[in-house]
Image (cartoon, rainbow, N blue to C red):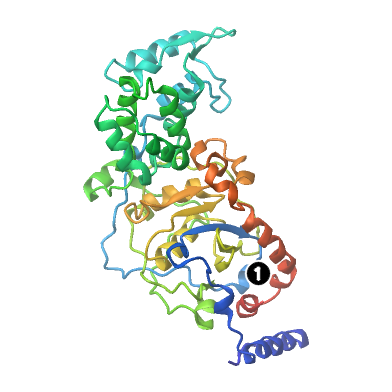
Amino acid sequence: MHVNTVCPSAFGRFQEAWVNFICLQQPSYGLAFQCVCPEDDQYKDIIVDGIELSLQRQRSQLWSTWGPGVDEIPRPGSLHKDRMFIVNRQERHLLRRLFGKDVGNTHAGLSHDEYGGLVARYTVHSSLSPYLAADLNGDGRFLACVRPHVRSFILELISESPVCAVLPHVIHRDLEQVLSNPSMMLPAPVIKDFEVKAPLLGKFIVGEALAMVLPTPANRLLVHALAVAKKCFIPANISEYKCSAQTRVNRPGEPLGEMRSPISAGSMEETVQTGTYFPNRPVVRSIGRYMADSWSQGCRSCTKHPYDTRNLTPGLLVVHCLNCWACLGFHMMPHHESPRTLFDILYTRWAVAPRFVVYDNSCNSQIFFLNREPEWVRDCQFFIDKMHFKGHVGCCQSYNIEQYPTFSQFNSQLAEQRNSRLALLKKQCAYVVVVHSSTI
């Protein structure tokens, strides 16, 4: 294949000759980007990370995404208010302070008036009411007098994160069976499974169980939490969505998502036009039109700030297999590590959602997916590696991969380690056109 580009300089002609030489060798790049896990586990567990391997913005003319025709009816995702254990943000902040968490510049603990007002709003019918008993601390502020495992679990439920991050879909059936018969002794294998797949839930149940039976207050709390977690994956109807959202005002530089048609995967043309290369993950569907692109539900996003590349494109989003460590492909990001980029890659190329996604922007990504394709992402769990989780102050601990003992055998720093090698090409990529950058 001859790459026909206009490169007037001597260095440009050398670049073109070098790329043509590589193409004449007909290297099988697809083999290098193939997952070698057993067939049942292929492409199911992935780790994603961005690297500032950037081109000059004026040299980058990529198609933003592929999507539906303009006549397709916008689809709603699940509602933010249905995904929250406590809908009112002010009440969430009061509860977090009551359970010992600083909120912004306000220290943990409640004043007498704050505590009295909070307790008055939570009647005996509330699933949280049995846990609101409080004592005065040394500063004369009220703090909940509960055991550590209860404090940790309730703080998870009342965080800014969707409840399905705390109670993932994979444990819903077993948890429902346990809760449907309150007098039944807790089955040990099921509890062990909870400790593996939802560690904070497992610790809460083990800590609260009396003679292997879950007390009524704990049962009521979990029934409420499970009901909310299930709603995370149910799309709202259009009229209800519009009542709960308002017209979106996009921030400068925020992508809207252009309506494009999918292109055949695996070709040099696709890589040049879209900046995407997944030779073994062809496009299986186009993305839809979503109400979330035009309507905002006021979801509070994580405050971790992206890096700024100014005159350069943000770089590459690189996807690796968490098990066999194979690089599965990459995508040239048109915007900073946006959840939209990950959504475009996974939803168009994975027929079934991955089982695990490790990504330092998983908190915002899960919300982005739930706002658009909640049913498709139901069986996918999102995690943040231990190095990046330190910067996620407001996110629930269920995203922290260190909470999960089964992940101790995996290298959650794989993407960072691989990207450190690619970083050696930063200077070269900043001065070449897209076709050369992709080949490099």
For the residue carrying disc 1, how many other residues have a C-alpha within 10 Å: few (<14), some (14-19), or many (20+)?
Answer: some
Q: Residue at 36% of width from left, 16% of height from top? A: 130
Answer left or right for 101 relative to 344.
Answer: right
Quarter assignment of residue 8: bottom right
Q: Nearer the viewer, residue 104 or 392?
A: 392
> Is residue 437 in view?
yes
Q: Where is residue 273 in the image (x, y as percent from the top left)?
A: 51, 77
Q: In this view, does 84 lie above or below 413?
A: above
Quarter assignment of residue 4: bottom right
Q: Residue at 41% of width from left, 22% of height from top? A: 208
Quarter of the image with the N terminus is bottom right
Q: Is residue 52 above or below residue 381?
A: below
Q: Is residue 150 above or below residue 36?
A: above
Q: Position of residue 390 (x, y in %)?
A: 62, 39
Quarter of the image with the C terminus is bottom right
Q: Which of 335 and 367 is in front in this view?
A: 367
Q: Nearer the viewer, residue 220 or 76?
A: 220
Q: What is the tally of numbered marks visible in this picture?
A: 1
Q: Position of residue 431 (x, y in %)?
A: 71, 74
Q: Residue at 26% of width from left, 47% of height from top? A: 236
Residue situated furthest right in the rendering:
10
Query: Which amino acid lies under the numbered mark 1 shown in the image of this protein?
Result: Gln
Circle 1 SS class: loop
Residue topped by disc 1: 56
Q: Which of 420 and 146 is in front in this view?
A: 146
> Is residue 384 in view?
no
Answer left or right for 405 relative to 440.
Answer: left
Q: Where is residue 197 in the image (x, y as percent from the top left)?
A: 44, 43
